[in-house]
Image (spheres, rainbow, N blue to C red):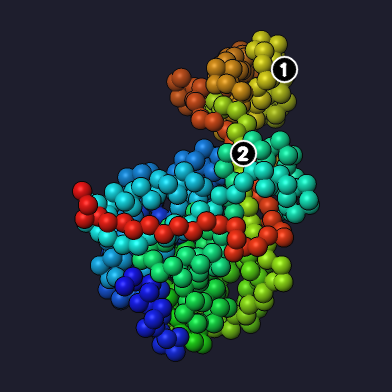
Amino acid sequence: MSATARLLQTHVPSSELRVLSASGQLGYGIPAAAFEAGIARQPHFIGCDMGSIDPGPYYLGSGQMAAPQATVRRDLEMVLCAARKLDVPLIIGSAGTAGAAPHLAATVQIVREIAAQHRLSFRLARISSDLSAQDMADALAQGRLKPIGPMPQPTREELLSCKHIVGQCGCETVAQALRMQPDVIIAGRACDTAIFAALPQLLGYDFALALHMAKIIECTSLCCTPGGRDAMLATLSSDGFVLESMNPALRATPASVAAHALYEQADPHSVREPEGTLLLRDARYEALDERRTRVHGARFEPMDKPTLKVEAAAAVGERVVLIAGATDSTLLKVLPQVLNDVEQKVRALVPGAWSRYAHIYGQGAVRPLPAHLQTAHEVGLVIEFIAPDQDTALAAASVYKQNLLHHGYPGRVSTAGNIAFAFTPSELRANTAYKFVLYHELMGERLGEMFKVEMQEIDGSIR
């Protein structure tokens, strides 16, 4: 009998359910002592978020993982071996960073290798989150794609150019996989909350409580004082849940836990999910002691027509970067204009469809700064050049660098040395540049029919 089958058959929601969140983004190192302390508490299941769109469009567009493969393997080995030793379900979401087909395949392959190394045998459910570019183009034409925030609406051509388009599957899809009674679930792009809320919902716990718990623990001990990346244990009951970091130095206080409602949320009182909205205005946070907090009172409001968050990225060219600094106060007063003037010179010298993007740290590279807050002493320059091929981007960067070094501007004292470069060569090749094409809500789809769930038997005893 699989770990999930046994839990579904024997566990009752009137008893407590212990949920261990092992990693807020698997692949960046799981603190071992806290994880082992969590395992000693005999959790009923282990969950791990493995990805995010936060690292930008490159990983979704390229199909590469953001985390180093060595630490990805180490983290996967820790959670897989622990789950199999306890014989409890392991649920991993947003495989390989962005959760597209190559990320999912790479993650499953590492799991297979670990299983062979440790002679582990188990049932694996694999959830594919990939969507068809043609289907998304049709949805665009039908008016069923709504931008999230200031995201522009893509063209049909841009959509069709995307190699990887993913939908963020929710609890409904993870529950579908759980009904197949696996020991391990590895999902492509997934809602962070689905990793931790789907199984409690299936067991009969209040969905609002389970979802609120999931929202907090998916980041492990980030909700604590001080915040950390250590494993987090949630104990769910019929009328609330208790939060405790497995690092004894970290405290889950009512204030720190309640403040987590602001994490990645424009409105701390409501959290949108594919199936509806989690309402937190009536949630209550009570200290059990100096390290643990009990939470209750959340409500869930289902939507008549569920929506799905969809993400896609497309290549825009090859990138080369210059990194430099400037301390000449006269230059700093006119720096944006100087950078534009140098670009016009270089366009006459380097033909081709290249673009220049300057980020002036100290004058508003991170966010716009009013003039009185801009530094008059020193700035850092990150200037990127993007072109259809890297040779053109490199040529533009090299010629731009040389012209910038000797460009004349009003009040200049020296004909050289007004710009300092941190490296030699100062032109740094920086991979293919990507942009987000989709960061949208998809409307009018049946969520239960969108994603493919496959069951595989992993037999690590076979060499």
State the separation of the CA atoms marked 2 and 1: 32 Å
Q: Position of residue 263 (x, y in %)?
A: 57, 63
Whether residue 263 can be seen here? no
Q: Please, is residue 439 above or below residue 123 in the view?
A: above
CB atoms of marks 2 and 1 within 8 Å? no
231 on left or right of 142: left
Residue located at (57% from left, 39% from top): 163
Residue located at (49% from left, 26% from top): 429
128 on left or right of 70: right
Residue located at (55% from left, 17% from top): 391
Q: Position of residue 458 (x, y in %)?
A: 31, 56
Q: Position of residue 138 (x, y in %)?
A: 73, 47
Q: Nearer the viewer, mark 2 or mark 1?
A: 2
Whether residue 313 can be seen here? yes
Q: Quadrant of residue 183?
A: bottom left
The count of marks equals 2
Amino acid carrying mark 2 in the image: Cys
Q: Please, is residue 88 above or below residue 457 in the view?
A: below
Amino acid carrying mark 1 in the image: Gln
Q: Quadrant of residue 250?
A: bottom left
Residue located at (31% from left, 66% from top): 83
Residue at the spot of label 2: 162
Q: Position of residue 332 (x, y in %)?
A: 66, 29
Task: Using the image as rendered, state which of residue 234 and residue 245 is in the foreground.
Answer: 234
Earlier in the chain: of badge 2 and badge 1, it is 2
> Label 1 neighbourhood size at 10 Å, few (<14), some (14-19), many (20+)?
few
Q: Which mark is residue 344?
A: 1
> Label 2 neighbourhood size at 10 Å, few (<14), some (14-19), many (20+)?
some
39 on left or right of 326: left
SS at mark 2? loop
